[in-house]
């Protein structure tokens, strides 16, 4: 059994697809998986024990994407089952060009190209949406299992609290560095503080580091812009507690069941919160009528969905999470 899986582009979405991937593997435990996706998605998912091959999809960078997609699909070959967790026409074309026996994907105007296009409601968690694609292969609806990564956890050797002030989607999803620093200070006597961030979030990490230094806190490690995707997953997996915006790293934490406080502002928490993380809580404001707006930047310029969340709101939720 050979299965092709086209991963979502974003790290968080790729993590939310892992329950569906685990579901597929429970159906076909001897199957060999081929993954296609963005660089960040592949770097997180390629360590799956049933992975036979993994490819970064660079067809968008080619001069003629249609031609590049055709050539890439022919290079991949044919599969017993091929599923895309993307919704663009090129992912449907890629599955069509592989001439695979069963092709699965979200229903859209172009999914006549697939053998099994499925309408997926957006009123449920994204992991459930993705899992329902796999449910087409079942005789009954099966609930998605937990998120899963196969990268070993880092061992810090001491209790560690991670803070993740970034969010790749846009500034509207980002809580403020001064407030993250306040939260870190509140628990610095119990935990080593680990600052996370991507290549574009080095300045934010440096801002928090400076604030911690001004507070006299020295037991911290600033990893912003210093980790590969594999290292990022490993370092998050080894944490004792994680404070984060709605972001890819939040879903990494869910895959390792790291106790997490997630700060939500402009996004739909019921659709993209951590999937089945036993010890997790969401901090958000119910009294901001314009949220969730799903915008990358605040269109009203006040950003109240985030400015109204205080450091103490998060500090108290951490205490509740650990029954302190």
Image: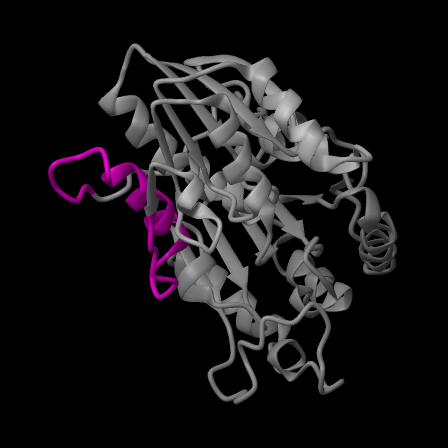
Q: Is residue 105 magenta?
A: no
Please provide percent x and percent y for residue 298: 71, 78
Please give left or right for residue 41 compared with residue 168 in the image: left
Residue in front for this viewpoint, 311 or 71:
71
Please provide percent x and percent y for residue 308: 62, 82
Please give left or right for residue 184 compared with residue 267 in the image: right
Q: Is residue 277 visible?
A: no
Residue in front for this viewpoint, 206 or 249:
249
Q: Is residue 35 visible?
A: yes
Q: Which quadrant of the figure has residue 303?
A: bottom right
Q: Residue at x 52, y 23 (%)?
A: 35
Please provide percent x and percent y for residue 90: 59, 40
Q: Residue at x 65, y 21 (%)?
A: 71
Q: Which contiguous range is marked in magenta?
A: 118-142
Quadrant placement of the N terminus? top left
| Picture mark count | 0
Residue in front for this viewpoint, 168 or 185:
168
State whether residue 287 is above or below residue 103: below
Q: How is the image coloured?
A: one colour
Q: Residue at x 35, y 66 (%)?
A: 123
State whether residue 306 is above or below residue 323: below
Please provide percent x and percent y for residue 249: 59, 45
Please give left or right for residue 81 compared with residue 237 in the image: left
Quadrant placement of the C terminus? bottom left
């Amino acid at each position: 059994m050979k299965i092709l899986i086209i991963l979502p582009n974003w790290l968080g979405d790729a993590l939310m697809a892992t329950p569906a991937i685990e579901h597929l593997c429970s159906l076909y435990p001897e199957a060999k998986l081929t993954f296609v996706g963005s660089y960040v998605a592949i770097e997180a998912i390629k360590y799956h024990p049933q992975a036979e091959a993994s490819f970064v999809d660079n067809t968008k960078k080619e001069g003629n994407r249609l031609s590049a997609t055709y050539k890439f699909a022919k290079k991949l070959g044919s599969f017993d089952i091929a599923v895309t967790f993307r919704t663009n026409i090129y992912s449907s074309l890629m599955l069509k060009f592989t001439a695979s026996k069963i092709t699965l994907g979200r229903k859209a105007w172009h999914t006549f190209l697939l053998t099994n296009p499925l309408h997926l409601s957006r009123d449920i968690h994204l992991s459930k949406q993705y899992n329902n694609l796999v449910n087409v292969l079942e005789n009954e609806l099966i609930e998605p299992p937990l998120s899963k990564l196969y990268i070993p956890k880092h061992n810090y050797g001491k209790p560690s609290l991670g803070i993740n002030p970034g969010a790749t989607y846009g500034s509207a999803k980002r809580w403020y560095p001064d407030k993250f620093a306040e939260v870190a200070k509140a628990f610095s006597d119990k935990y080593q503080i680990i600052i996370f961030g991507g290549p574009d979030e080095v300045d934010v990490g440096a801002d928090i580091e400076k604030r911690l230094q001004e507070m006299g806190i020295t037991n911290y490690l600033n990893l912003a812009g210093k980790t590969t995707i594999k290292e990022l997953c490993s370092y998050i997996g080894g944490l004792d507690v994680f404070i984060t915006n709605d972001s890819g790293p939040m879903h990494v934490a869910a895959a390792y069941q790291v106790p997490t406080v997630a700060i939500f502002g402009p996004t739909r928490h019921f659709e993209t919160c951590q999937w089945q993380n036993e010890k997790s809580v969401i901090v958000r404001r119910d009294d901001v009528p314009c949220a969730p707006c799903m915008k990358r930047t605040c269109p009203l310029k006040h950003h109240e969905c985030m400015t109204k969340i205080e450091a103490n709101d998060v500090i108290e939720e951490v205490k509740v999470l650990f029954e302190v």
